[in-house]
Amino acid sequence: MTNSFNSIEFKNNKLILLDQTKLPLKETYIKTDEYERIAIAIERLEVRGAPAIGISAAYAIALSFKNITIVQKNHFEIVYERLWKTRPTAVNLFWALNRMKKVFELNKNSKNIYNILVSEAIQIHNEDVIMCDQIAANGLQIFKKKSTVLTHCNTGKLATGGGGTAFNVINYGFKKGKVKFVHADETRPLLQGSRLTAFELSKSGIPFSINTDSTAAFLMQNNKIDLVITGADRIALNGDSANKIGTYNLAVLCKHHNIPFYIAAPTSTIDQKCKSGKNIQIEFRDKKEINSFKKEKITSEEYEVFSPAFDVTPNNLITGIITEKKLHLPPYNFRIL
Ligand code: MRU
């Protein structure tokens, strides 16, 4: 296993995605120039995390124009709709698709449409790299002392185009001597914490341990956590934030134990059409992910399963929301960005 890795790379007119379903035990890559394969990669969570989904979808739109001499009338709409349906909660997907749509509308008659769309996708990717660094810089102020941090799901290089959101705040904090230890929630059911965040913490040399999601209360009760920071998949205008299932539990626990709870996300995660968390569509996962493990049955297939992929943390439980612009404090109003 190499020490550094690229999770999303556009090279020689192909998209190269590090297959996140195989990590951390295998480092394998998906290399494709087919938009359908990228749509499948998003659906399978081979690429996941809100900003990374948006970036991949932008490249997918562009690649759908590669090698096309005569563009069929509805080509853009077909590709756009296919990608639109891949996952419902992370707004970065729709944000990126709409950005590509604007560029397409302006240039649809150009012979150069493929290169124009590729440039826009690269621009979206590059902007995310910069936003990740700005989020990290703005986040440093949350560390009031050398801290032990708890995080949930995966918000690092794998989930974004750059160094990450919440993960990058932790990483910058560690480099500046403000973070001493990280507890990574394993993040049921797909284990983004124990597989992906642990992989990234290990690569960054940050001391950490993995804990089951239900251990967070125990850690807090024993004064082991100074603050919690997570990412978000969609933030409403009033600050209500959707993130991986279990995030809301953490925010409630933080309130009870008087521990600060922060969210870090780029402004592409703020949904300008969404007034509050009530309007956020939550993805539900297949029961197979709960009643079996690595294709081995662990409970009866006949049992019903309830498996939302995300929950919404209400704004009154969020100490601060870190974006590339600043650390936003309550009351949140993201209408004017
Ligand atoms: O289902 P996933 O793995 O795509 O969910 C990802 C998360 O919930 C992340 O915390 C969120 O996208 C923030 S990524 C910077």
Image (tube, rainbow, N blue to C red):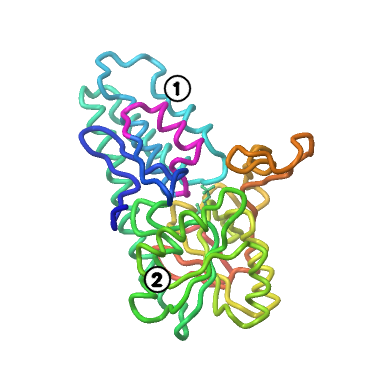
In the displayed structure, does residue 5 sit left or right of residue 330?
A: left
Q: Earlier in the sequence, mark 2 or mark 1?
A: 1
Count of marks overlaid on the render: 2
User: What amino acid is labelled 2 in the image?
Assistant: Ile
Q: Residue furthest bottom?
A: 145
- Indicate whether 286 appears above or below 196: above
The residue at 74%/42% (across/down) is: 299
- Along the viewing direction, whichever of 4 and 53 lies nearer the viewer: 4
Q: Quadrant of the C terminus?
A: bottom left
Mark sitting on residue 206: 2
Q: Which residue is mark 1?
A: 78
The residue at 31%/28% (across/down) is: 33
- Along the viewing direction, whichever of 93 and 36 lies nearer the viewer: 36
- Indicate whether 267 appears above or below 143: above
Whether 34 is among the magenta residues is: yes
Residue range of the region highlighted in magenta in the rendering: 31-50
3D distance between C-alphas at marks 2 and 1: 44 Å
Report crowding for label 2: few under 14, some 14 to 19, many 20 or more residues within 10 A (C-alpha).
some
